[in-house]
Amino acid sequence: GGMDRVEDASVNPNLEIDINDQGTSDGQMLPLFEEWLEEFDRLKEEEGSPSKPFYAQFYNFNNHYPYLDDHSDFSRLHGDNYITSMKDTDRFLEDLFEFLSSTGRLENTIIVGSSDHGEDPFKKPLARTKVLTSHILHSVGYVYYPRHLMTHEGMEERLRRNTQMMTHTLDIFPTLLSIVHGGNVATDGEYHDHPMSDPNTAADEGCIAGIDLAAVDIPEDRVTIAMNLVSGVSRSLTLWAISTKDFTLYHRTGRTEVYPLQQGRDNDYVLEFGSCTKDVMKLCMTDLSEEKEEYFRRAITSLRSYGSSFVGESVKTSKIVRFFVNILGGESAMEQ
């Protein structure tokens, strides 16, 4: 809603673009975008509002299972198709940036990219529906934010620092909202138009709150909670995780084992991030040792010490947190 133009080959048969059973090549969106921007500029001139900003949203589906574009081949391995899809996405982004630069728009445009999840296609097709690995939990995101558009001193340094800290998918919305409102989500300290973007309100509702990455310094010891979508709708598969910047304590309950990823039907694991994930063939997974048990006891203690701007009281006592406390020896062990 709110868009003045939507281009979707699945619902608009009049689009003059090639389409196969899996969708289209993402690159075909760019000529449509260029055409729309020309029309947008013309309307701006007619309205006498030359500084009116534009908003555009792209959904890139080449880089989604089964990783096919108009030149892909079903006979290739999933990993091969995945690499091809990554090249297609890289090419789309390169062409997008080149177009914005050549038309003088790039330095006045903020570009945000995100992924709903990662994947592990070299080990198991559709791994994300069966397990949570380091590659699946740490999905890629990026922000292109020209310095002269930043409204507060120190914003650039804060954003760069925060990208090296533990971020959460939920941080994207308040960050975007802040950008739209000129660098501050709240007006006079109140979230009048967007009450659920107020982390304190979200906490009161029992929700895990995201933060504005341009306005808040993420603590070194930030802890986040994650669950797979199927965990909320299926009793046969539960995937829960509690994460720090470096490790995740992960629990899997399922009807079947996943042999390529060495995951059983009811298991707890420690997932490693950082340099380990540079090798897509590594599992980045170990058993829960005594040392890691103590590590995650400290992590949960940190989580419970946060103010409501990060985590509400109902989240601190949620089923997921209580479950991991029991894995780590119960409340008595937490108090030692």
Image (spheres, helix red, strand yellow):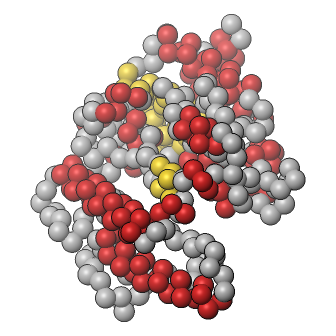
On screen, residue 311 versus residue 149, left or right, reads right
Q: Position of residue 95 (x, y in %)?
A: 33, 65
The residue that appears at 72% across and 32% down in the rendered structure is: 316
Seen from this angle, which residue lies furthest left?
75
Q: Position of residue 84 (x, y in %)?
A: 22, 56
Seen from this angle, which residue lies furthest top?
336
Q: Position of residue 56 (x, y in %)?
A: 52, 71
Q: Position of residue 22 (x, y in %)?
A: 29, 71
For the C terminus, the quadrant is top right
Q: Is residue 141 visible?
A: yes
Question: Vertically, is 192 above or below 322?
Answer: below
On screen, residue 103 versus residue 150, left or right, reads left
Question: Vertically, is 99 above or below 126?
Answer: below
The residue that appears at 55% across and 63% down in the rendered structure is: 108
Q: Is residue 318 visible?
A: no
Front in this rendered view, residue 329 or 220: 220
Front in this rendered view, residue 176 or 265: 176
